[in-house]
Image: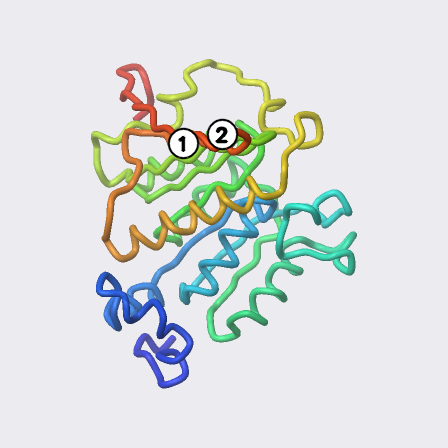
Amino acid sequence: MNKSLNKKEIERFSRQIILKNIGSLGQKKIKEAKVLIIGVGGLGCSVAEFLTRAGVGKIGIIDNDLVNLSNVHRQSLYDVGDINKSKVMCAKNKLNKINPKISIRTYNVKLNNTNATKLIKNYEYIVDGSDNFKTKFLINDNSLKLKKFLVVGAISKFDGHLFTYNFKNKKTPCLRCFFQEDKISDDILNCEYEGVIGTVAGIIGTFQANEVLKQILNIGQNLNKKILILDLLNLNFRKAKITKQKKCIC
């Protein structure tokens, strides 16, 4: 991929290029970035859409599910014409229409102990949009091992949680430092049983995309050693500190 910006790209991204924290140099950094999104559901759709619109040069998307009707209210890349089709292929088709110049690689697989390291190692920035703790811990552990920048989102009902971990920093706690129990019920992440309003997925997913862009550009502050907790029913936002645990793998 040609990393320089052509006339069309300068026009497309002009509104963010004029920001003093970005400029043409920052836009080139965005174009050179490689981001892996694990789970293209409510969170992953928003992440993929906004990173595509921002001009991230290489995006990988992992999901082995098919689109169903109950997905459409919160998973913004799908419509009723996509029902029973592969999520990653539908997402790729929509993203290519938004920005046909970027590279989107699809992985129609379930992330597991066998393929996780191989898939994650090829990307600089990892976004966790999964909906179960087994997958979240698998992403956490491999991102830690490979020293990646990881953004984790979780949603339920009217609530959202956001974590960022820069594992190049040895002092960074990990997801296991926050969820210290050996076994955690997936019911708190299960939209089928707990329910979720679609706007929560869009908001947290957009926050995740924003954290990735900030890290690519090396601007602002991230949530290192903190978790952002959003109660969107009552519009309460707060941060809680995460302490690195001595017994944790990190």
Mark 2 residue element: strand
Q: Tell me residue 224's x, y (percent).
A: 28, 35
Q: What residue is drawn where x is 26% and y is 31%?
A: 172
Q: Tell me residue 118's x, y (percent).
A: 45, 47
Tag 1 near tag 2, CB within 8 Å: yes
Please count the marks in the image. Answer: 2
Q: Amino acid at mark 1?
A: Phe
- Neighbourhood count class around disc 1 (C-alpha, 10 Å): few under 14, some 14–19, many 20 upward: few
Going from N to C along the chain, the mark reached first, 1 or 2, is 2
Task: In the rendered view, tell whether residue 81 sits above or below residue 139.
Answer: below
Task: In the rendered view, tell whether residue 173 sits above or below residue 95.
Answer: above
Residue picked out by circle 2: 231
The disc label shown at residue 202, or none: none
The disc label shown at residue 237, or none: 1
Mark 1 residue element: strand
Mark 1 and mark 2: span between their CA atoms?
A: 6 Å
